[in-house]
Amino acid sequence: QVQLVESGGGLVQAGGSLRLSCAASGRTFSIYAMGWFRQAPGKEREFVAAVSWPGIRTYYRDSVKGRFTISRDNAKNTVYLQMNSLKPEDTAVYYCAAGRQPTEVTQDYDYWGQGTQVTVSS
């Protein structure tokens, strides 16, 4: 089992920044790729970004490329999502997840956090 706890969400104005953190505990963090997903009200959960083990490869959905950066600190068992130039359409609950491969598919991830709310006002 891997337990994931997100933090860092909040309310920010358009153009602002937030950094989300996801702390992992339990089974070895190092064997997992990590991903960030988000879900807005009335919409399906969607892929945002992913990072491989140990952190060399990163992947992003097109709409966040150049604005968001995923990274991981393996010594701290933590993955981050730095979000800059935030837009109202980035408003959602953000979830981190652990899986065997850094894919865009929710079913490929075995463990999920409880989510953290990000609200971007216009």
Image: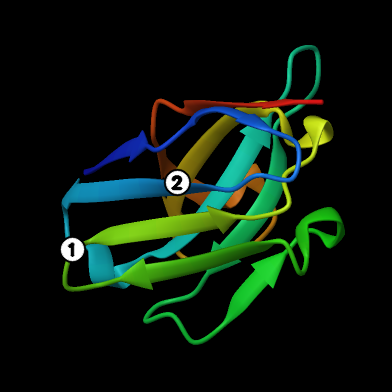
SS at mark 2? strand
Rendered view: 38 above or below 48: above
SS at mark 1? loop
The residue that label 2 is drawn on is: 20
Instruction: Say which of marks 1 and 2 sits in front.
Output: 2
Q: Nearer the viewer, residue 28 or 69?
A: 69
Q: Position of residue 75 (x, y in %)?
A: 16, 73
Please report the residue visible at 24 percent of the width from the left and 63 percent of the height from the top: 29
Q: Which label's residue is closer to the chain start, 1 or 2?
A: 2
CB atoms of marks 1 and 2 within 8 Å: no
Disc assigned to residue 28: 1
Rendered view: 62 above or below 3: below
Please report the residue visible at 69 percent of the width from the left and 56 percent of the height from the top: 104
Is there any visible trace of residue 101 in the rendered image? Answer: no
Mark 2, residues whose alpha carbon is within 10 Å: few (<14), some, or many (≥20)? many
Q: Nearer the viewer, residue 112 or 10?
A: 10
Mark 1, residues whose alpha carbon is within 10 Å: few (<14), some, or many (≥20)? few
Residue 111, picture quadrant: top left
Residue 113, picture quadrant: top left
Is there any visible trace of residue 109 in the rendered image? Answer: yes
Please report the residue visible at 37 percent of the width from the left and 81 percent of the height from the top: 54
Identity, as a three-letter code, of the amino acid under mark 1: Thr
Q: Nearer the viewer, residue 81 or 50?
A: 81
Q: Residue furthest top?
A: 42
- What colouring does the structure picture have? rainbow
Identity, as a three-letter code, of the amino acid under mark 2: Leu
Image quadrant holding the N terminus, namely top left
